[in-house]
Image (cartoon, grey):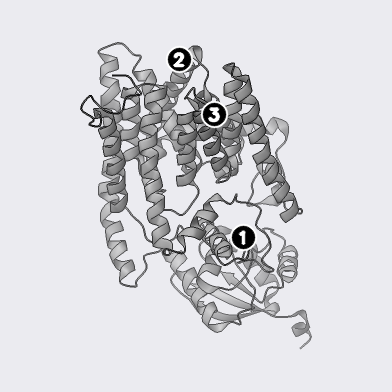
Amino acid sequence: MTGRQRHDAGGRPDGFGVAAFGFALLHLLLGLLVFEPTLFPGGDNAGYLILGDALRSGEGYRDLHLPGTPLHARYPPLLPSLLAGLGWIGGVGVAKVVMLLLTATTVWVTAHFGRRWVGAGPALGAAGLLAVNPTLLEYGHYILSEAPFALCVVAALWFSGRKDHGGAVVAMVAAVAAFATRTSGMTLLAALPLAWLLQGHRRRAIWAGVAAFGALGAWALYQRVAAASEPGYLAVLLLLDPYTPEAGSVGFGGLFARAAENSWAYVSRVVPETLLGPGGGAGSGGIALGFVVTAAALAGWVIRSRARLAAPEVFAVLYAGLIAVWPSVWTDRRFLLPLMPVVLLLALAAAWQLPAPAGRWLRWAAPAVIGAFGLAWVANTGPDRIACVASYRAGDPCDPPANESLYAAARWARDNTPPEAVIANRKPRLFFWYSRRRGDLYAFSSDPAVVMQGLEAMEADYVVVDQVSGTTQRYLVPAIRAHEDRFEAVYVGGEPPSAIFRLLPPAANAD
């Protein structure tokens, strides 16, 4: 039976197809066990939901949470467009279930993509690891770009290996969809035409390159029109710390130092945490696992590249290079996750090249051990998540305490402030989701005068002192203390406590 056959002579699905579907179904079931009904506390998911609401209501691609509701120019529009459509069906719960369906589909597509690329054995091993992977399971219930982006990546790489014109078209459509989901999809847009050019498919490479430049140019033009004053992608990439802009930018030589630092962090901490779950990178065992998996993936890449440099190999280099030079504060599992199907397939392909008996043991025993950690994570996490779902349905949300305190303050603001009030806070998208009061971030500056100028430029009526981020204590609280006569406490509540202060006009100082 060839790798392309899907059914046996009797018309029944072959064993590989059944196994691939079984792993996807397993991921779906495990995802339901660790399902979390609350919003991701980072705030990005609220941003996507707000953009979806804006599109669905006909207000355009706008940041409804910001004063003046400007056009949005940071996130590409595919995920918000999906959420806009899902909003007609249901709320946050429906969107979360769809994210889980997308990650389950990623498991299934990885199996079939891997079968075509590296063979059935490594493909099933990688699909099995993804099915129980704690990180993929976590992002299977977050309304973030990880789930659709990872699926678009593996789908594009799967179809890129087909020789027919139709497969190439589907691959490019998936690559454009990846870029329309997350800007880092530019690496996939570049990988496909470059790989086809290296393989001698010049005509395919030319039209794919035109399509890629068209997608990149269209988004760049929109960004320029929508937010000409906002820093571009490269400017943010070069910041030493996006959360401390005053720290400045990194120079060309500093990029190499950053790449080395980030690469060490990914290998020694992020790779094992991605495979084993939070805390999995702790200790020498985690570091060893990270080095073994990375070394195996590199060996697999070399073996594959010697035979044929295809889109997956090119994408792996471009995407790994991009996340290596991103600001170190963004070195995290969520940015490695889209690359993990390729990493696992390459690592297992290398293991399949090892001679027996060591090779035979590594082929199945190593994935089984790693997979056991994933199942253990589900067993440890599942009971609390099930209790959280029950509590949520009973009207008692199980958000982290600091976030619940912030949301309580937001609900108070919804009921006790004018609809047109502008409220500055650390999580303006989450705060808007619960309060329907617009606002923006306070200035990230250690100079109280700069913070006050930012509040006045925003025309803020209130500010929120929260416990969800250290930047509030670092920047906002010193400004309040330096100008105590400009602030009046109107709300304190929650545990840990959150506070809302009314910002008084400068004329109040004359009294």
Classify residue 129 as left or right of residue 511.
left
> What secondary structure is marked by label 2?
helix
Badge 2 is on which residue?
303
Q: Name the residue carrying label 3.
A: 315
The residues tagged by marks 1 and 3 sit, at their Cα atoms, a distance apart of 39 Å
Of marks 2 and 1, the one in the foreground: 2
Q: What amino acid type should be assigned to the residue bearing mark 3? A: Phe
Quadrant hosting residue 280: top left
Q: Is mark 3 on a helix, strand or loop?
A: helix
- Pick whichever of labels 2 and 3 is earlier in the sequence: 2
Within 10 angstroms of label 3, few (less than 14), some, or many (20 or more) residues?
many
* Picture residue at 61% right of the left edge, 66% below the top: 64
Picture quadrant where residue 358 is located: top left
Q: What residue do we see at 40% from left, 64% from top?
A: 399
Position of 321 compared to 121: left or right? Answer: right
Residue 256: percent from left, percent from top: 64, 29
Asked whether 112 or 272 is in front, the reply is: 112
Which callout, 1 or 3, points to the residue nearer the camera? Answer: 3
Q: Split into 4 quadrants, where in the image is the N terminus?
A: top left
User: Who's the residue at 67% across and 59% down the image?
Assistant: 71
Ranked by sequence position, the earlier of labels 2 and 1 is 2
Q: 46 or 440, which is in the foreground?
A: 46
Percent x, y of residue 451? 71, 65
* Residue 292 in sight in this render: no
**C-alpha distance separating marks 2 and 1:** 50 Å
Which residue position holds label 1? 474
